[in-house]
């Protein structure tokens, strides 16, 4: 039976990846700075291997963020206190921002100085997303009617 990574370890790893990519640092360069192989960095970023406290401190210094950065938006304990409940929308955002596409979009958007232009970009993206959702709903309705 394959063991799945703990949600906290996955979250911390995704935050390591997000900051590393934001700094345009390769896994190999981060590994060199920490005295690790890039494979070990990969395992940390996927949450496969848990990051110890002293290593997390080392990573935070290397990536120029406080250790608390890695826990921002982390899954919280469930109501029963025996598990973790992830907020799917916040995890989706973290996962998206960890991609090259998400970081590129974020960097580009941050360079837009005019607040009116930024608002228009947001409105455009929302309209495109709504249009896509409307098209999906129409296809689903058409498929249902065809049955």
Image (cartoon, rainbow, N blue to C red):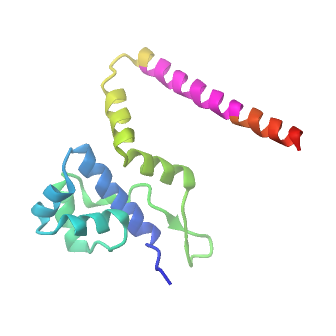
Q: Measured from the top left, where is residue 133 in percent x and y?
A: 66, 34
Left or right position of 147 against 43:
right
Q: Measured from the top left, where is residue 83 in percent x and y?
A: 55, 75
> Is residue 78 placed above or below 72 in the rendered structure?
below
Occupied quadrant, residue 58: bottom left
Q: Residue at x 38, y 69 (%)?
A: 9
> Is residue 88 placed above or below 55 in the rendered structure?
above
Q: Nearer the viewer, residue 109 or 138?
A: 138
Q: Residue furthest bottom?
A: 1
Q: Nearer the viewer, residue 128 or 120?
A: 128
Left or right position of 128 against 56:
right
Q: Nearer the viewer, residue 33 or 26?
A: 26
Left or right position of 19 against 78:
left
Residue range (magenta)? 118-135
Q: Measured from the top left, where is residue 123 in percent x and y?
A: 54, 22
Q: Residue at x 85, y 42 (%)?
A: 144
Q: Residue at x 36, y 72 (%)?
A: 48
| Residue 94 on the magenta segment | no
Residue 69 in view = no
Occupied quadrant, residue 147: top right
> Is residue 18 placed above or below 117 in the rendered structure?
below
Q: Measured from the top left, where is residue 53 in percent x and y?
A: 25, 73
Q: Residue furthest front?
A: 146
Q: Residue at x 24, y 51 (%)?
A: 20
| Residue 132 on the magenta segment | yes
Q: Main secondary structure of the magenta part?
A: helix
């Amino acid at each position: 039976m394959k063991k799945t990574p703990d949600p906290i370890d996955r979250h911390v790893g995704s935050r390591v990846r997000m900051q590393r990519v934001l700094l345009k640092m390769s896994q190999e360069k981060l590994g060199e700075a920490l005295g690790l192989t890039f494979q070990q960095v990969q395992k940390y970023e996927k949450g496969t291997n848990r990051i110890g406290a002293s290593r997390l401190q080392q990573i935070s210094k290397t990536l120029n963020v406080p250790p608390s950065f890695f826990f921002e938006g982390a899954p919280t304990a469930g109501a029963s206190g025996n598990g973790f409940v992830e907020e799917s929308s916040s995890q989706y955002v973290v996962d998206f921002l960890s991609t090259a596409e998400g970081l590129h979009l974020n960097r580009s958007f941050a360079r837009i100085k005019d607040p009116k232009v930024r608002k228009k970009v947001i409105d455009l993206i929302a309209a495109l997303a709504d249009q896509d959702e409307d098209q999906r709903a129409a296809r689903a309705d058409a498929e249902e009617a065809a049955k």
